[in-house]
């Protein structure tokens, strides 16, 4: 067989011109070296070899079809975002490394093919401009004020300062690579499939079934604290119960939007919606249950179909009954001596002891304290106390400029996603409905936690914002084509 292949290759070379022969020989030499290197690496470091093979295959797919980069980010991020920073990739989370890798492939593709993105694709619309200002207000502005006041700038501050820029990079990748409604549809299905996997793992974790907790402990225990994974509150592969619930709510709205557009898909979308609803309750978070209610009401009002709420009458009792072992302990917390859960009292103590006094001290209310949204402490499992209020986080991290930038970003995003979400004429409108609902829910839930930066769910929200913009791009492209056609007919 190898002799026949060699003869065929030799005959092809004989018929080819000199330039083709050189390229063929170069490919042959590189292929032999790569195969030999892969064989040696597979023997000495099989995990690294597998990673290189997967990375090479992903790079080839992105090179051929750039939208694969968006699919990879949307589908892989929820499954790996709960892995601690530096555990598998030095100084980074796996999803952050994935995004940077895909950006590198896309940039190399644009340069080598000599067809970089057109300048009009890089123009900032109102949502993108508001997003950039939001990122600047959460990073550059507070750092400048810290330096001006002579306060020490720590690595924790720099790490938190790049959080919004990381989300902006994700937004740009999805925005530039997804170019058609078919690609938007694929991205939405990828999101729902990944959401189902995360939801099923979370449900099994909360009920302690099939040994899921033991499977999650090696990689998804935050800071190595395994008690978080072994608790009844499902963090799944996201590693944070509230973020897992937010992710489920976003995918629930996607499924409802797809079901509204194509009722014939009820056979697969209906079970997905049930998984998402049950997974929200598996997180055992009161704020998450509130977010679910807000999302259902928002969808019904936005579509002017209040009759859709009747389905919640069927789904919610099923979820509560199935996850009663997880929900019951949370309800029992209200029977304590103080009449409320201990975690609420601890949260109030932390806010009034560690954060609020510094926010109202001097000019901190105007310019913020520092980007790092946590303070180190000697006690506790993690060694840190995080700000458990989203609006206080805005004032802490950037003062009034960050608060104003957040409000402006939400306002511009709601104005951009609201009209298409009402009609659901295209798949990008479904993404707009999910983004609109997620933003409305976020505005309310920011009272309790900084949901706008929650890992996993924030990635999904900003990805949906980018997908919703694809509909606007298609409309503008059609208008330009119609304009050119009319000009050509007139001449």
Image: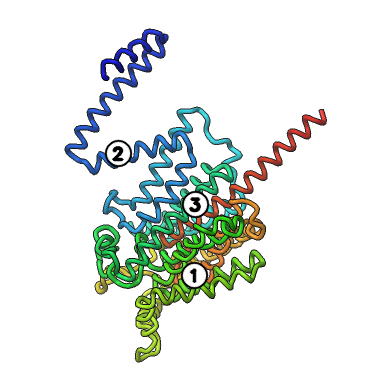
Q: Secondary structure at mark 2?
A: helix
Which residue is at 46% across, 46% downward? 71
- In this rendered view, identify the residue nearer to me: 272 or 225: 272
Can you say whether 266 is above or below 473 in the image?
A: below
* Res 59 seen here: yes
In this rendering, the count of numbered labels is 3
Residue 446, numbered circle: 1
How crowded pointer 3 is (Cα within 10 Å; few <14, some 14-19, many 20+) is rated as some
Q: Secondary structure at mark 3?
A: helix
Q: Earlier in the sequence, mark 3 or mark 2?
A: 2
Can you say whether 146 is above or below 121 in the image?
A: below
- In this rendered view, identify the residue nearer to me: 490 or 447: 490
Circle nearer the viewer, 3 or 2: 3
- Report whether 313 appears left or right of 324: right
| Disc 1 from disc 3: Cα separation | 28 Å
Q: Which residue is mark 3?
A: 189
Q: Earlier in the sequence, mark 2 or mark 1?
A: 2
Report x, y in % for residue 235. Answer: 35, 65
Q: Which residue is mark 2?
A: 52
| Disc 3 from disc 2: Cα separation | 27 Å
Can you say whether 17 is above or below 436 in the image?
A: above
Which residue is at 35% across, 54% downward? 80
């Amino acid at each position: 067989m190898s002799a026949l292949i060699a003869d065929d290759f030799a005959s092809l070379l004989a018929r080819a011109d000199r330039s083709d022969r050189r390229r063929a020989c170069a490919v042959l030499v590189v292929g032999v070296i790569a195969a030999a290197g892969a064989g040696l690496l597979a023997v000495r470091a099989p995990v690294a070899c597998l990673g290189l093979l997967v990375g090479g295959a992903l790079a080839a797919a992105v090179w051929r079809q750039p939208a694969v980069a968006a699919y990879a980010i949307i589908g892989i991020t929820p499954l790996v975002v709960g892995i601690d920073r530096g555990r598998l990739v030095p100084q980074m989370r796996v999803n952050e490394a994935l995004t940077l890798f895909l950006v590198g492939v896309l940039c190399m593709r644009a340069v080598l093919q000599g067809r970089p993105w057109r300048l009009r694709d890089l123009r900032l619309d109102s949502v993108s401009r508001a997003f950039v200002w939001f990122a600047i207000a959460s990073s550059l502005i507070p750092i400048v004020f810290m330096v001006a006041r002579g306060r020490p700038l720590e690595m924790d501050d720099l790490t938190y300062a790049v959080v919004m820029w990381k989300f902006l990079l994700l937004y740009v990748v999805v925005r530039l690579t997804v170019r058609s409604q078919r690609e938007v549809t694929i991205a939405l299905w990828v999101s729902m499939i990944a959401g189902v996997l995360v939801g099923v793992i979370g449900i099994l974790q909360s009920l302690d079934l099939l040994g899921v907790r033991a499977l999650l402990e090696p990689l998804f225990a935050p800071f190595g604290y395994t008690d978080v994974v072994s608790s009844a509150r499902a963090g799944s592969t996201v590693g944070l119960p509230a973020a897992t619930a937010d992710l489920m709510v976003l995918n629930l709205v996607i499924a409802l939007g797809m079901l509204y557009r194509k009722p014939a898909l009820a056979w697969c979308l209906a079970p997905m919606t049930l998984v998402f609803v049950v997974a929200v309750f598996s997180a055992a978070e009161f704020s998450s249950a509130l977010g679910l209610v807000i999302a259902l009401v928002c969808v019904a009002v936005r579509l002017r179909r209040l009759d859709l709420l009747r389905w919640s009458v069927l789904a919610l009792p099923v979820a509560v009954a199935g996850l009663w072992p997880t929900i019951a302990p949370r309800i029992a917390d209200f029977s304590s001596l103080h009449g409320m859960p201990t975690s609420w009292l601890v949260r109030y103590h932390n806010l009034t002891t560690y954060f609020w006094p510094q926010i109202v001290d001097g000019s901190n209310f105007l310019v913020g304290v520092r980007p790092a949204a946590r303070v180190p402490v000697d006690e506790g499992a993690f060694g840190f106390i995080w700000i458990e209020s989203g609006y206080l986080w805005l004032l802490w991290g950037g003062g009034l400029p960050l608060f104003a930038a957040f409000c402006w970003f939400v306002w511009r995003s709601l104005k951009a996603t609201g009209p298409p979400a009402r009609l659901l004429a295209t798949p990008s409108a479904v993404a707009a409905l999910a983004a609109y609902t997620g933003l409305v829910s976020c505005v309310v839930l920011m009272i309790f936690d900084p949901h706008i930066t929650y890992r996993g769910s924030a990635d999904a929200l900003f990805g949906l914002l980018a997908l919703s913009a694809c509909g606007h791009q298609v409309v503008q492209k059609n208008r330009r084509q119609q304009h050119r056609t009319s000009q050509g007919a007139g001449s």
